[in-house]
């Protein structure tokens, strides 16, 4: 029996489940140093700033405009931590941006790459908010808005999935491959950021 597209995508995301990454686990447990959050805000913002391009690649201009506004909120998140989004210095983050730049240049692979992120974002946002509210209250309320607006944002991944199901089998294969490559790149980007602060965490 053929495996459905939904199941294929779910399997890919389960393999690179960001909620299970040690960086997010440490965030949830309150063992992640604030300096690691600063690095994350600065580095990961290079990806967040590209999300609008992915939506624009397949004609969703209204959502692309919203994502540009969300990138501004990410900048505020970085600012609240005393940093800003700068050109990536972590090799794995540079790899992530290169991966999505490639996939966001085509409407089929853009959908797959975006799904890798959008399908996980409501869950990672909820986890990060809980961690902030439990362990990082001294950082103030300005660290929350980006994550607050994504906790219940399930409509966008549902839309992408619906569109993917309408593609030809060949295009679905391309989209799944893009999803898998992006999932791995997202996971590895966290690994690269996390590695910079492992000594601080262990200390």
Image (spheres, helix red, strand yellow):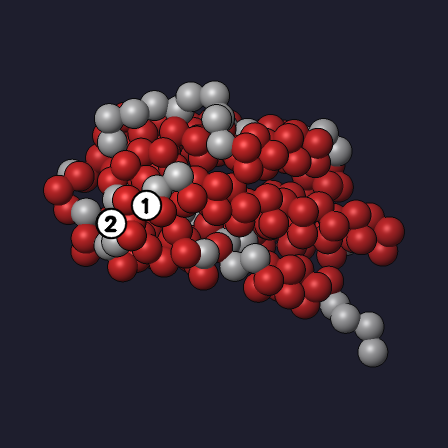
- Callout 1 touching callout 2 (CB < 8 Å): yes
> In the rendered image of this protein, does residue 195 appear above or below residue 39?
below
- In the displayed structure, 9 sits above or below 67; it is below
Q: Is residue 188 visible?
A: yes
Q: What residue is shown with label 2?
A: 203
Q: Is residue 95 above or below residue 12?
A: above
Residue 65 in the image, given as x and y percentages of width and height:
50, 27
Position of residue 61 in the picture relative to residue 22 (left or right): right
- Which residue is found at the position 86% from the left and 51% from the top? 170
Q: Position of residue 60 (x, y in %)?
A: 62, 34
Q: Which quadrant is home to the N terminus?
A: bottom right
**Tag 1 residue:** 199
Residue at image location 70% in from the left, 36% down from the top: 103
> Tag 1, which secondary structure?
helix
Position in image of residue 150 (x %, y %): 40, 46
3D distance between C-alphas at marks 1 and 2: 6 Å
Q: Residues within 10 Å of mark 1 (few under 14, many from 20)?
A: few
Residue at image position (59%, 36%) is 96
Q: Which mark is residue 150?
A: none
The answer, for residue 147, to whether it is visible in the render is no
């Amino acid at each position: 029996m053929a495996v459905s597209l939904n199941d294929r995508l779910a399997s890919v995301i389960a393999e690179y489940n960001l909620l299970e990454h040690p960086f997010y686990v440490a965030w949830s447990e309150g063992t992640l140093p604030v300096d690691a959050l600063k690095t994350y805000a600065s580095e990961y913002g290079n990806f967040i700033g590209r999300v609008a391009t992915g939506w624009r690649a397949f004609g969703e201009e209204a959502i692309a405009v919203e994502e540009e506004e969300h990138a501004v909120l990410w900048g505020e998140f970085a600012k609240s931590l005393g940093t800003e989004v700068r050109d990536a210095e972590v090799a794995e983050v540079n790899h992530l941006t290169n991966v999505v730049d490639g996939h966001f240049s085509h409407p089929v692979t853009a959908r797959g790459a975006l799904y890798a992120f959008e399908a996980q974002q409501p869950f990672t946002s909820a986890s990060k908010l809980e961690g902030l509210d439990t362990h990082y209250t001294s950082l103030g309320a300005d660290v929350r808005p980006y994550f607050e607006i994504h906790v219940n944002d399930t409509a966008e991944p549902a839309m992408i999935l619906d569109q993917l199901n309408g593609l030809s089998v060949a295009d679905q294969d391309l989209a799944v491959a893009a999803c898998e490559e992006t999932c791995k790149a997202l996971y590895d980007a966290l690994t690269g950021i996390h590695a910079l602060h492992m000594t601080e965490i262990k200390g």
